[in-house]
Image: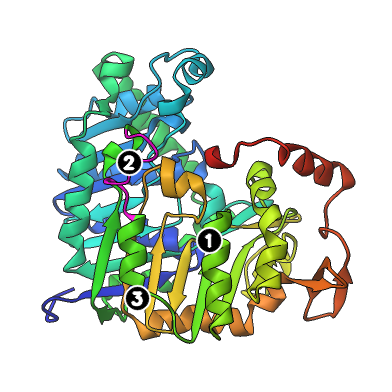
């Protein structure tokens, strides 16, 4: 991984869920000094248990581990986290914790404005020399480990100049007043709890040796390339953007801690084309104006977001749907992800598949003019822009921009419906089969009613 590219960083996209997971495990295994892990969600599931087992193994051989998690998803696992923290080489901190450990909902009600604001960052740094960020949290749906639902997601693995920047960002959050050691919140655990969890984890790894998923990890061609240093990094100029953790304490009108104004300034205006992929997309009036103005100036503007059938957050869809018509009228090419073609796609990729599966979009990326691409944790909605903390990398890479543009041109029509206007009504077009739907495809009238009902409430800024 020698860096003979002064001033540049090397990037490699992780689009496949199995590769994205395998990369993390292989890097944990290769760690010699430190591993810094920062996530919004850390689900108690097969992938997370394997991930944690690998971290513990690294700690046993002397690697120093810092695990920083948003407190939102930790109710069911903080006992385990406190047990891990007994290890001399593992520290665990929770960000913006709920004051009431037993009844989270209570705290949420009494202090809604701050507790509804979360650390949405995703950062994984090994030995201060390799860094992964992007849309994925730690949990099965992010790593193609679930049969029934899966996120279409994107991470980018990077080396070079950007890594110390990422470490600086991690330290900023780690040392922030809202980051609390898990033992302060939960009380110290004893040596026995560490012995117990070590046993539980290694037993779990043993029992899962034969599982379908672990087998896929073992057979990964990608990991063989990673281990033999055969990954072709794309060396380019880049900027790491991240919100300051103070953002969650600031008033929403106060933008000094926010990365988005700087990111948009740095991205500039597209001249020929813009591709925007945002699972949760609430452009608000100003966003609609911006995108339709670009379209009027002859820019080819494509937006991909979740359809109602694919989304995992109905309330966001309620916030988004009122802008659809204006976007389409204004010349924006609007696409919505289909939920159901995942099985066929997995089979094509030669995966073993059982049951039926639903896809949901979770990748957050945009590219302008095949020149610059942003990959990160930020959705284009009020929650990401104003409430939660986010991060991401802006890369001046024609190669990665074209990688996304090529997918949009050649494969997206298989995965998504195009939203169009016919006689002033919205229709959904399957451009592959030429099938047309007059209302949101693959949804029940009850689901559509729920979304309509939610859309009556003025809660957009909380979405």
Q: Nearer the viewer, residue 27 or 332?
A: 332
- Horizontal arrangement in the rendering, residue 276 relative to residue 10 (left or right): right
- Horizontal arrangement in the rendering, residue 236 relative to residue 121 (left or right): left
SS at circle 2: loop
Tell me which residue sits at (11%, 78%) in the image: 6
Q: Nearer the viewer, residue 261 or 7?
A: 261
Residue 351 found in image quarter:
bottom right
Do the numbered discs 2 and 3 sit on residues whose CB atoms are within 8 Å?
Answer: no
Counting from the top left corner in percent of width and height, residue 70 is at 38, 35
Tell me which residue sits at (16%, 51%) in the image: 168
**Compared with residue 195, is residue 307 higher up or lower down, i.e. above or below?**
below
> What residue range appears in magenta?
250-259
Quarter the N terminus occupies: bottom left
Colouring chosen for the image of the structure: rainbow
Q: In terms of secondary structure, what is the magenta stretch mainly?
A: loop
Residue picked out by circle 1: 287
Tell me which residue sits at (25%, 80%) in the image: 235
> Which numbered disc, 3 or 1, marks the residue closer to the eye?
1
Rounded to the nearest angstrom, the CA distance separating label 1 from label 2 is: 19 Å
Residue picked out by circle 2: 254
Residue picked out by circle 3: 225
Residue 424 found in image quarter:
bottom right
Quarter the C terminus occupies: top right
């Amino acid at each position: 991984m020698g860096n003979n590219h002064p001033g540049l960083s090397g990037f490699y996209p992780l689009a496949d869920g199995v590769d994205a997971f395998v990369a993390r495990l292989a890097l944990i295994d290769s760690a010699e000094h430190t591993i810094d892990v920062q996530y919004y969600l850390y689900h108690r599931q097969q992938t997370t248990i394997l991930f944690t087992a690998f971290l513990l193994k690294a700690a046993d051989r002397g690697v120093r581990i810092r695990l920083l998690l948003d407190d939102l998803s930790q109710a069911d696992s903080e006992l385990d986290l406190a047990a891990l923290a007994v290890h001399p080489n593992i520290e665990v901190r929770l960000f913006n914790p709920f004051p009431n450990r037993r009844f989270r909902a209570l705290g949420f009600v009494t202090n809604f404005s701050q507790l509804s604001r979360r650390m949405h960052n995703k950062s994984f740094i090994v030995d201060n020399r390799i860094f992964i960020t992007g849309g994925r949290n730690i949990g099965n749906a992010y790593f193609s480990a679930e049969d029934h639902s899966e996120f279409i997601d994107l991470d980018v693995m990077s080396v070079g100049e950007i890594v110390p920047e990422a470490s600086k960002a991690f330290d900023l959050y780690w040392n922030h007043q809202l980051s609390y050691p898990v033992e302060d919140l939960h009380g110290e655990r004893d040596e026995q709890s560490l012995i117990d969890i070590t046993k539980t984890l290694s037993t779990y790894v043993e029992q899962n040796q034969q599982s379908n998923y672990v087998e896929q990890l073992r057979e990964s061609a990608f990991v063989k390339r990673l281990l033999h240093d055969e990954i072709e990094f794309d060396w380019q100029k880049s900027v790491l953007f991240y919100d300051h953790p103070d953002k969650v304490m600031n008033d929403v009108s106060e933008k000094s801690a926010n990365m988005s104004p700087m990111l948009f300034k740095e991205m500039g205006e597209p001249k020929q084309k813009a591709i925007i992929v945002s699972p949760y997309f609430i452009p608000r009036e100003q966003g609609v104006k911006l995108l339709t103005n670009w379209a009027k100036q002859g820019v080819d503007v494509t937006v991909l977001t979740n359809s109602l059938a694919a989304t995992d957050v109905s309330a966001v869809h309620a916030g988004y749907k009122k802008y659809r018509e204006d976007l389409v009228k204004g010349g924006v090419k609007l696409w919505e992800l289909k939920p159901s073609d995942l099985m066929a796609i997995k089979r094509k990729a030669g995966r073993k598949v059982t049951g039926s599966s639903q896809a949901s979009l979770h990748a957050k990326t945009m590219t302008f003019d095949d020149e610059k691409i942003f990959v990160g944790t930020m959705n284009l909605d009020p929650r990401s822009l104003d409430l939660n903390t986010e991060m991401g990398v802006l890369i001046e890479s024609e190669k990665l921009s074209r990688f996304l543009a090529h997918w949009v041109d050649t494969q997206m029509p298989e995965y998504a419906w195009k939203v169009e206007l016919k006689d002033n009504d919205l229709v959904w077009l399957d451009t592959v089969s030429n099938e047309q739907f007059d209302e949101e495809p693959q949804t029940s009238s009850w689901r559509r009613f729920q979304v309509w009902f939610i859309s009556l409430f003025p809660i957009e800024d909380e979405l």
